[in-house]
Amino acid sequence: MSAIWLHQLPATIVLEPTFLGPRQMSTVRSRAAKAFAHLEVIRARPEQESILANLLELYAYDFSEFKDLELGTDGRFGYSGLAHYWSGPGRHPFLVWVEGKLAGLVLVKRGSEVSGNDTVWDVAEFFVLRRYRRRGLGTQIASQVWGQFPGPWEVRVMESNVPARDFWAHAISIFTGEAIRPVRVEKDGKCWILFSFESKCAA
């Protein structure tokens, strides 16, 4: 898989591709399917905004390991713009359920945060509760979401967040069946690892 829109990226460095062989991909898919036969990724309704807000607090707490986030005076991190996911165009909020229990969230929006491309789909936020991690669930969730929105996608990861970089490298290669060639992008004093790929058909 080749990176796209490289001419639009400031201070771009192409990184070495990550390879997953057919046997590895098959094993991961099989384990994930067996472990989470009752996985649901459902579009969140406006009345479920508070549920997403609560999950985003857990997400922000985890993310504070890699980024300096400060609590507000109300003891919450907060997430500005969440309401826009029901009022603005090109925004899609999802709740993740496993065996009927909340397991995470995904926020999808149109437009890149780092490359300047307004036509790509962007994984704005992606969160899985700790009890469900390292069991293939995240890969299943991502594949379901990507399959719903055909076209170009970008996934951006803070350079310091090595676990997330490794996860997305595996998840995207499994979804596309191709090796991954991410790029390093510097923008506004921050360093990102950017994955670009194509979702070819709706799930």
Image (cartoon, rainbow, N blue to C red):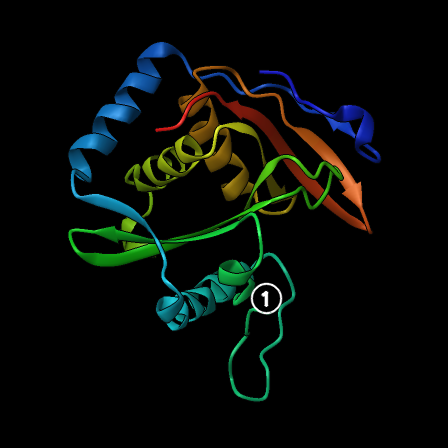
Residue 113: % across, % down: 69, 46
Residue 113 versus residue 33: which sits nearer the camera?
A: 113
Instruction: Give percent across and percent down for residue 90.
Output: 56, 47
Residue found at x 65% / y 43%: 111
Q: Residue furthest bottom?
A: 73
The quarter of the picture where the N terminus appears is top right
Residue at 54%, 23% (x, y): give it.
198
Quadrant in which residue 95 is drawn: bottom left
Q: Secondary structure at mark 1?
A: loop
Q: Indicate whether 139 appears above or below 82.
A: above
Q: Which residue is mark 1?
A: 81
Residue 186: where, in percent of width, then height?
A: 79, 41
Q: Is residue 96 left or right of residue 79?
A: left
Left or right: where 191 falls relative to 44: right
Q: Is residue 138 visible?
A: yes
Residue 144 or residue 136, whichever sits in front: 144
> The disc labelled 1 sits on which kind of residue?
Gly
Q: How many marks?
A: 1
**Mark 1 Cα within 10 Å, few/some/many (few <14, many 20+)?**
few
> Which residue sits at x=50%, y=42%?
163
Residue 128 appears in the figure: no
Residue in view at x 47 percent, y 28 percent: 172
